[in-house]
Amino acid sequence: MSSLTKLLSILEFFQVGNAYMTAEEIVSKLGCSRPQGYRYIKELCTSGLLTRFSGADSLGPRIIELDFIIRSADPLMQIARPAIHELSQRVGCDVTLVKLFGEHLVALHHEQYVHNNSIGYSRGRPMPIFRGCGFKLVLAHLPTLRQKHFFDNYQEAVPCSTLGKTWEEMRADLKKIRKRGYATSEGELDTEKVGIAAPVFELGPKAPPCALTLIVPAARYATSNQQLLAELVKDVASDISRRLERFETQAN
């Protein structure tokens, strides 16, 4: 591992529920000498990527600045955000957009129709593996070997997915999801909510898609035209994908 990679790996130590760490804790996780570890921490603090408070370090203000730049320049967010807002207003429900980063599904945007204490997956918040339609949708579009990797390495989470208990059962369900173009989940992230997710292809159909998810109250979903809702989410996701494709074509 290069010195730069080791330095940047410090940022990955900070998670929800573990937002502050002492220098000694960071050095211990790094597995390097104390002088080297302290030098890395000092460099990150100088750059604003870390900040010190009451003897402990946390992610710094530069992270917020970088996220602002991403939001302002990212074609995905520029194109998807208005469509997400329109879908939320049209249906009267929350809408989220999530993306797979390595082993984690992360929320890129959460449009709340009514600002309350409903499912709070705001930007940057990691989402549970094998729970919710967003993960199922993304998993269905991954290569078979990648799907098997998740099945083998997250055995304790597989029963939460309603995708079956065996690899064969899960693989069969994922094929069905990919064929029909959307995934659903009922009560997996919130017992009173149903999710409907469709793929947004940011980098073409061969790359893992983002998942556009409509979050509907379970009582309302039970009396709704469920197929119509699914087709609506699919249409909006497809429109975002087409706009992204046109943007990339024009940029090149």
Image (cartoon, helix red, strand yellow):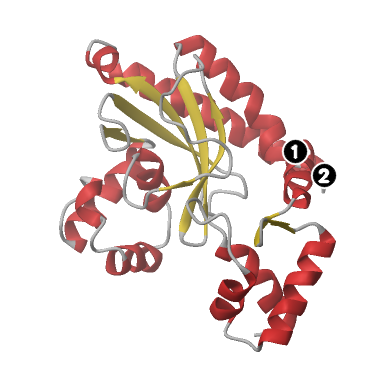
Q: Amino acid at mark 1?
A: Phe
Q: Secondary structure at mark 2?
A: helix
- In front: 130, or 126? 126
Q: Is residue 213 left or right of residue 193?
A: right
Q: Residue at x 63, y 87 (%)?
A: 32
Q: Residue at x 57, y 44 (%)?
A: 124
- Say whether marks 2 and 1 touch (CB < 8 Å): yes
Q: Secondary structure at mark 1?
A: helix
Q: Quadrant of residue 47?
A: bottom right
x and y, in percent, of residue 17 in the image? 47, 52
Q: Residue at x 45, y 12 (%)?
A: 91
In this view, 81 is above or below 205: above
- In front: 3, or 223? 3
Q: Which residue is mark 1?
A: 247
x and y, in percent, of residue 86 in the image? 58, 16
x and y, in percent, of residue 221 in the image? 28, 17
- In front: 103, or 116? 116
Q: Which residue is mark 2?
A: 251
x and y, in percent, of residue 40 in the image? 74, 75
Would residue 2 be seen by someone viewing this image from the given angle? no
- In front: 177, or 249? 177
